[in-house]
Amino acid sequence: MTFQQPGAYAATAGAAQRAVPAQQGVPMAVPVPVPVRAAARRPAATVRDLREREGRSPRVLAFAAGDTVVVSGLPGSGKSTLIRRTASAAAHRIDSQDVRERWEARMPRAVPYALYRPLVRVAHYAGLRRALRSGEGVVVHDCGTQTWVRRWLARDARRRGVALHLVLLDVTADVARAGQQERGRGVSGYAFARHRRAVARLVRDAEAGRLPVGCASAVLLDRDAAGALTVIEFPGPAAGA
């Protein structure tokens, strides 16, 4: 099963030649060369809803070489797990959780995370900047509340003539809290409420066909669809090539 959109497609194993019907109200488009300064001629943003597929979810999400993919959702929704399990070897995996774990391994147990959190964030964004400058595909963990990060990624994508894509994990608050308990690391009630509002707005806008400025496409996943994915890859030519 294959669908095509600006710089991205999804496929299920064993059925890569059958087109998925276009979502109602959302135009289908094939990847085309897009000059960096020709924003007015860019294809319309595309939204693919892969929720509630009852075992018919794609196994692969593929994007053009050099594109940036932002994975967003509630804390505990499975963003880090999805990125670690599916990001192809050819892509840069940028997850603040990875940076935090590296710092935690080096710091004395008696030092609370709050004291070195700013250093973790600086290291995370420095790593993201290096990954973007490499020109290779990047998969980025996003909490949903940092809109300035998506604006930064959108500007970088325009500058490099590639595309920015959004992958949204849509799970209930109860499922997300259970995920936090399972990993042994939660967020405060205030922070979780902020995340819920931000992610709900992203999902609601995507369902209405409205994407953050600079995003070429969005993919909506529930827990089953996320579990069905085996790889996020970047096999195609760069969008500006």
Image (tube, rainbow, N blue to C red):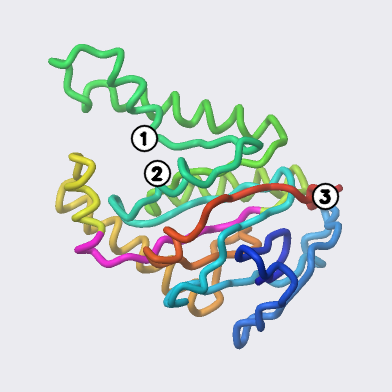
Mark 2 highlights which residue?
80
Mark 3 highlights which residue?
240
Residue drawn at 76 percent across, 73 percent down: 29
* In front: label 3 or label 1: 1
Residue 104: which quarter of the image?
top left
Residue 117: which quarter of the image?
top left
Looking at numbered disc 2 in the image, what kind of residue is underneath it?
Ser
Q: Position of residue 41 (x, y in %)?
A: 82, 67
Looking at numbered disc 1 in the image, what kind of residue is underneath it?
Gln
* In front: label 2 or label 3: 2
Provide the secondary structure element on which disc 1 rests. Answer: helix
Provide the secondary structure element on which disc 3 rests. Answer: loop
| Pointer 3 local density, CA inside 10 Å: few below 14, some 14–19, many at least 20 | some
In terms of sequence position, does the residue under pointer 3 or pointer 1 come before the other? Answer: 1
Residue 118 in the image: above or below residue 171: above
Residue 220 in the image: above or below residue 125: below
Q: Are marks 2 and 3 in contact (CB under 8 Å)?
A: no
Residue drawn at 43 percent across, 47 percent down: 142
Mark seen at residue 230: none
Residue drawn at 42 percent across, 69 percent down: 203
* Closest to the observer, 173 or 51: 51
Q: Are marks 2 and 1 in contact (CB under 8 Å)?
A: yes
The boundaries of the magenta stretch are: 164-175
Mark seen at residue 97: 1
Whole-angstrom CA distance, mark 3 to mark 1, is: 31 Å
**Horizontal side, residue 135 vs residue 131: left or right:** right
